[in-house]
Image (cartoon, rainbow, N blue to C red):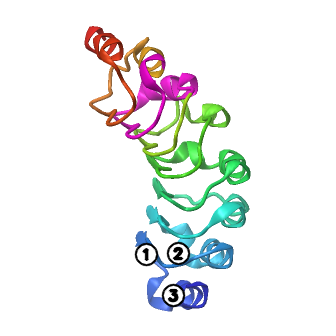
Amino acid sequence: GNPGAKLLFEAPRLRAVESLALDTCELGAEAIAALVASPMWSTLRELDLSRNPLGVDGIRALAAASPPPHLHTLKLADVDLDVAAVDALAGITWLPQLVVLDLSNNEIYSFDHFAHLGGGSLKQLLLAKTDLRDLNVVAQIAQTLAVLDLAHCGFGDEGIATLVANVPPELHTLDLEACRMTGEGFRTLCKA
């Protein structure tokens, strides 16, 4: 919870922590504000906040933070993102420095606000169970990705066609499990 997390972030021995996994700790905006104000914010390389009720206030606390100089992995799977939280997340200026971004299992229907991630450092983008329908921006960002997870998204054959129109040369892992692909989409994928 928030009180325990605040104590953790203030602990002198944790000032140089580089990897922090706080999956399913019942953290909210109060804990995130304490994290980004702590000395460890400047040393973190990997941060997993998955399955916490962050919502829009937690994301706004991240957005208000100074850019973390070493952070390359951010996992925000199932953190109660809604439309307002996704908008706040897209506005975070330091997102393009990330190598891994996990937004799986959140209410993300459009990725249009994230076009600035294209051409950045991003190599792994995990968007499983987000119900994305329009993959135009994802396809642009995918040009530099090595891993793209779109499992359980409902984009179907049209999304497959958009995605593979310009197959990214560096992509080596593509998860399309349960994306409503028919034989037509499968043929399109095989041709690519």
Figure quadrant of the N terminus: bottom right
Q: Nearer the viewer, mark 2 or mark 3?
A: 3
Which sits earlier in the primary sequence, circle 3 or circle 1? 3
In the picture of the structure, the residue carrying the numbered disc 2 is 40
Name the kind of residue labelled 1 in the image.
Answer: Val
Which sits earlier in the primary sequence, circle 1 or circle 2? 1
> Dot 1: few (<14), some (14–19), or many (≥20) neighbours within 10 Å?
some
Magenta region: 134-158
From this view, report whether residue 12 is shown above or below residue 67: below
Nearer to us in this view, 3 or 128? 128
> Dot 3: few (<14), some (14–19), or many (≥20) neighbours within 10 Å?
some
Task: Name the image quarter holding residue 69.
Answer: bottom right
From this view, report whether residue 177 is shown above or below residue 160: below
Whether residue 96 sits left or right of residue 189 in the image: it is right
Q: Report x, y in % for residue 34.
A: 64, 79
Q: Report x, y in % for residue 111.
A: 60, 35
Q: Is residue 133 magenta?
A: no
In the picture of the structure, the residue carrying the numbered disc 1 is 17
Question: Could you tell me which secondary element the residue under label 3 belongs to?
Answer: helix
From this view, report whether residue 61 is shown above or below residue 113: below
In the rendered structure, are the residues bearing label 1 and label 2 in contact, judged by CB atoms less than 8 Å apart? yes
Q: Nearer the viewer, mark 3 or mark 1?
A: 3
In the picture of the structure, the residue carrying the numbered disc 3 is 8
Please tell me the numbered disc located at residue 1. none
Name the kind of residue labelled 3 in the image.
Answer: Leu
From this view, report whether residue 133 is shown above or below residue 101: above
* Residue for point 62% across, 35% down: 110
Name the kind of residue labelled 2 in the image.
Answer: Met
